[in-house]
Amino acid sequence: MKITDLPEQERPREKLLQRGTAALSNSEILAILLRHGTKQHSAIEIAQQLLQQFGSLRNILNAAYQDFCAIKGLGQTHYVQLQAAFALSQRILEQDLSTKFKFEDFKSLEKFLLSKLSLQTREIFAVIFLNTKMEFIAYEELFYGTLHHANVHPRELIKRVLANNAAALILAHNHPSGDPTPSRDDHMLTEMLQDSLKWLDVKIIQHIIVGARRCETILA
């Protein structure tokens, strides 16, 4: 069925304009971003195939280009559109964080880190650099690892601290399993990095573990 065959109030674009994005299903939002279907399948049907094939929005955004385009009716343009839409949402959050950020505001920080790290399928260690007034300087992803582990090198972290002229840090890394419960190794890493930064008089405010839907914090 073509989308134009649906009642007007059930078409994704019209529904969004009349009732807002909250009224749309995942497949309808994807259909708007995909824009067009094929002669055989509507954009909604292709979006439903995407969700069925990859299982979740997270997996769709992390899908390899070749796997994404293997679905009939999808190509480079569709892949680029989805990736660009996701990148735009991340940049909006990052812009908000840089202008309004206070490290005590855990909800905005959690929202930002979930957007950056919760969809990743490998472990990534990131740092938010803060100035003496605890204002946002930069967010950087410094170390990349496997499904279970990322090697963190204190010397490289110190280099970035000096380059950003940072006075304090918020550390963050994801657990690709989706469970943000800090491990013993996470606690040990926090202590080790805090010791490494003492001579610079740089404080680690907190170390945030990012899961699939929420974060947990190790207070330094």
Image: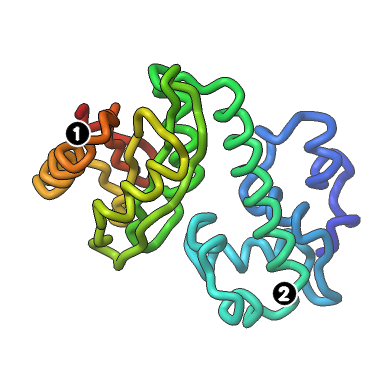
Q: State the residue at coordinates (51%, 64%).
A: 62
Closest to the observer, 184 or 129: 129
Q: Say whether disc 1 or disc 2 marks the residue closer to the N-terminus.
A: 2
Question: Could you tell me how far apart the alpha carbons at marks 1 and 2 are, in whole angstroms?
Answer: 52 Å
Residue pointed to by mark 1: 198
Q: State the residue at coordinates (42%, 48%).
A: 118
User: Does residue 198 sit above or below 104 in this rendering?
Assistant: below
Q: Is residue 60 left or right of residue 7?
A: left
Question: Tag 2, which secondary structure?
Answer: loop
Circle 1: residue type: Lys
The spot of residue 93 in percent (x, y) is 59, 35
Circle 2: residue type: Leu
Q: State the residue at coordinates (54%, 74%).
A: 64
Density class for disc 1 (Cα within 10 Å; few <14, some 14-19, many ≥20) is few
Q: Is residue 122 left or right of residue 137?
A: left
The residue mark sitting in front, 1 or 2, is 1
Q: Is residue 172 left or right of residue 5?
A: left
Asked if residue 88 can be seen in this view, the reply is: yes
Q: Quadrant of the C terminus?
A: top left
Asked if residue 182 can be seen in this view, the reply is: no
Residue 18: image quadrant is: top right
Residue pointed to by mark 2: 74
User: Does residue 23 sit above or below 27 in this rendering?
Assistant: above
Task: Tally the marks.
Answer: 2
